Image: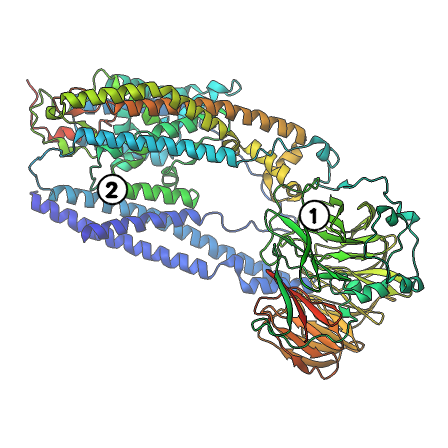
Amino acid sequence: MDQEAKIKLSHQIMIISGIFSLFVASLLLFNFWHMYKNDPVESKALKAMVEQLSSDPGNEELITEIRNYDLLARKAYFTSVWQVNTGSYLLLFGGLIFALALRINTDLRKKITKPEGSNEKLFPARIKAHRWLLVSGGVIIALSLWAGFGSKNYLKSYSPQEIAALPDEGIEVVQIVEESSPNAIDPETIPETNEAQNEELTEQPESPANPDARVNKIHFGFEDFRKNHNTFRGPFGQGISFHKNIPTNWDATSGKNIRWKVATSKPGYNSPVIWNDKIFISGADKTTRMVSCFNRNNGQLIWEHEVKDIPGSPATPPKTTDDTGLAAPTMAVDGYFVYAIFGTGDIIAFDLDGKRIWARNIGVPVNHYGHSSSLMVWKNKLIVQYDTGKGGRMLALNTETGEAVWDIKRDNLISWSSPVLADVKGKIQIITSADPNVAGYDIETGKELWKIACMMGEVAPSPGYYNGMVYATNEYAILAAIDPSVPSILWENDEYLAEVSSPVAANGILIVATSYGVLVAYDAMTGDKYWEHEFSNGFYSSPMIADGKVYIIDMGGITHIISADKTGKIIGQPELGEDGFALPAFAEGRIYLRTNTSLYCIEEE
Amino acid sequence: MKKILSRIFLLLLFSFVFFAAQSQQRFPKPEFESGYEQPTPTTPEPRSAGMEWADVFVLLAVLSMASWLAIKKRSRKGMIWLSLFTLIYFGFYREGCICSIGSIQNVALAFFDSGYKLSLTVLAFFLLPLIFALFFGRTFCAGACPLGAIQDLIVINPVSIPSWVRKTLDFFPYVYLGFAILFAATGTDFIICRYDPFVGIFRMNAPYIMILLGVAFLFLGMFFARPYCRVFCPYGVLLNWMSKFSKWHMTISPAECIKCKLCEPSCPFDAIEIPVNEKERTESSVRKNLKRFSFYLVLIPVWILAGGFALSKAHVFLSRANPTVYLAEILITHPELKTDTENLDIQTFLESGKSMQELVEEATLIRNKFRRGGWYLGGFLGLVLGIMIMNQFTMRKQEIYEPHKGNCFSCARCIDYCPVEKKK
């Protein structure tokens, strides 16, 4: 065979093997596309059937159908895998033949050229080489030093004592009293007050000047809470504010009715809480957690403290999703101290002047979004709903020392909702909502008083309480009106279900806001629908009722103000110009709104 | 145009191999509820000792054949066929394991850990190519290494790169070798095996990133011949040292070189020593070089100390590659993970009955090993770098065309270019 014939033959082999390989490659590509589009693991039909089964677990016919479908999906999948494997080998074979033919063809076509020798100058090349070697060595040394100085040796920060205290639970309470002063209070010596006493207490100083005064302090009651905005969703967390003359019109862009606006140092989805002239927020990023106190009259920062040096606090914070972060829970204030909890499990108490009182870590939460349940406070107890991946849990901490007054396990899964306090027949109950139970607890002992299994899924909305009734909802579950005295569900509805936003009831109506932008009102006693509005932005924030109106801020930063009655008349839709997730706080004719970057005070001129 | 098309085609080809590998094990195991018991997983039996020795025998035969083909027979064609055999046997049949390159780690671990027993066959795989290199040059690279073979067969249009780039890149195999020994000696990882770019292709299965790396190496290898061998291969460092002293190294010309320059473009690895232009050796240049040589000679201890200090300083960072250290740190920084039932490492530790204290102590010991190892590694790299820099200012007399004994892979390409006949 002469040279030309060899070139021709190798060329033909190249073309044939190339076409063959491209054909196989195309088939493989189609196979991949088909597998991607029809991923049996993500089959919608299968998921729908499984969901159906969860509501009808005894349906044998459905079980057989699911098994058959599952088998079919697996068969399809493994057939595809076989095709991919076989195709890969064929492609490899074709590719090798092609490469060989290409190489032979290239070699045969090579022409002899006149050798010209190297033009490279020896010495300049070596000078260049030595420089680059110097650079290489320098880079390696610099990188090593950078890695060395930038790496913390966590093995040295290991403390055997800490872990020894928690061998089985993994991580548990490492409690400290930051200021172990001789003035530490025996909670039993604190006198409880009645409503009559509360009336007299409203003029008391917001913080005792002398720590000794705390020993004999009298706890503020509900009447004092009404005059402030001390917890998530206002007093007792019920979503009702008792302040009047609340603004209905503002515009953040033009500054209309914006009394002041200040930048916050750290982001956070928590809502502001207020006690007298002070307003408090918390914030956190991956490295720092912060508590800030502002003068609510002029926005001036009064104090701001970093939350750190807490034993048991993780060196690296747990992972959270961007829409939760480490500072989602709202703080609580009781007139003496202000309390904050973070997604790390750290809880800290300051007095209203910013003096750190105590801090502790109650265990890093196993929570795939991040901890978001807010604090409640009543008398000498700080209530922490701490439902994590390890199961349900709730604690009452002594507000003076941070020690657990009671710490109970709850019969439910992880949740993101906050507890609500309610005066039920003269006794304060903690009401919670999680999968599967909506339940009530005695605040003094933590004893479960009642429960009703009606929730499911990842429960984030907190319950509502009005006129002796509890309202709970969650997406994929139901909206339930519960009479806790039986307990029983008086009425239920599944037309509009909230994903994050909590229901609120007042004036005989119940308001529910969905994450897809529907705001709906029902008769609180019968469940009859009064009105509904659909807005372009969804709601993660919860509705508050104040001054006879519903205030709710949507995810686009628009506050929808609607009359809290059977008409549902839209009164105003003022804008912030920033995304909104937190709830408004109200005080003396003003609204306080918090975004991820700013804190606003709104007051009509 | 044809070249571009063919290159695109090859890229496509290997991309699909990558997809094929990625598609494995995607489907979760079914959850049976009807009394069916999942079969207990079993560990495959290791290769029998007889077969292991058979591998050693094959290696010995291939090395002998390669040496004969390069030095005696002087046949490039023969070498190609031998490479193909090696690729099929040690590559696709033995799936890239056992290999002499990876055996460095077994030897290092056995040297530093008395509890690790080194098998004789592994030792043979480590020593045989070195012994052959000491007598016949790097004939292992030419015909007995599957990694070399797969790259060699794909060399299509190699380009010559400037000598300063080559000389700079010559440093990196030392870095890889040093780190491979450090990681193996501390019982951390066999990084040569873990990051072998071609083993995924041999096995038709690997993490997608490794398949992608292999494809990238092959694609690059079409123009920059044998990139892994020249820039990374840690075993190449040892072979280079041995080969420099080889007694019967392959020659380009079977008799006296006539300096016809025909062989000059023949080597895709730029491993041919070219006669030095004597005009460049002026008196002033020699004096300047001597000054620089002396300066960098004095600087060698500084390099050793600087390297040792820097690498030992990085011991905290480097030791995180060790699973024990990593586990201890993750449990200290993220104690909540103890409840993560899907984290097998953590669950295995918890079930082992070992206390956290013991784990931390063990991790601290390993970290200390890294600190000491960092000093040795940094000192070694500093020494190598110092010598390499110093060598840039030495100049040997070079009058004929001949292979660079250290860098030449003995592939026998250049032989076909030489017009000189062997004297009868």
> Where is residue A164 drawn, in percent x and y?
73, 33
Left or right of B407 on screen, residue A487: right
Residue B28, image x and y in percent?
Answer: 54, 50
Residue B90 visible in the snapshot: no
Q: Along the line of sight, which residue is nearer the eye, B246 or B311?
A: B311
The chosen color scheme is rainbow
Chain for disc number 2: B
Amino acid carrying mark 2 in the image: Met
Say which residue appears at 10% left-offset and 25% top-offset: B279
In front: mark 2 or mark 1? 1
Mark 1: few, some, or many residues within 10 Å (few <14, many ≥20)?
Answer: many
Residue A509, quarter of the rendered image: bottom right
**Circle 1: element type:** loop
Quarter of the picture containing the C terminus of chain A is bottom right
Q: Do the residues labelled 2 and 1 touch (CB within 8 Å)?
A: no
Residue A219 is left or right of residue A2, and the answer is right
Q: Quadrant of residue B102?
A: top left
Q: In which quarter of the image is the N terminus of chain A?
A: top left
Q: Name the residue under label 1.
A: A345
Q: Distance between the residues labelled 2 and 1?
A: 56 Å
Question: Considering only vertical position in the picture, is A39 above or below A114?
Answer: below
Where disc 2 sits, the SS reads loop
Q: Residue A403 carries which label?
A: none
The amino acid pointed to by label 1 is Gly
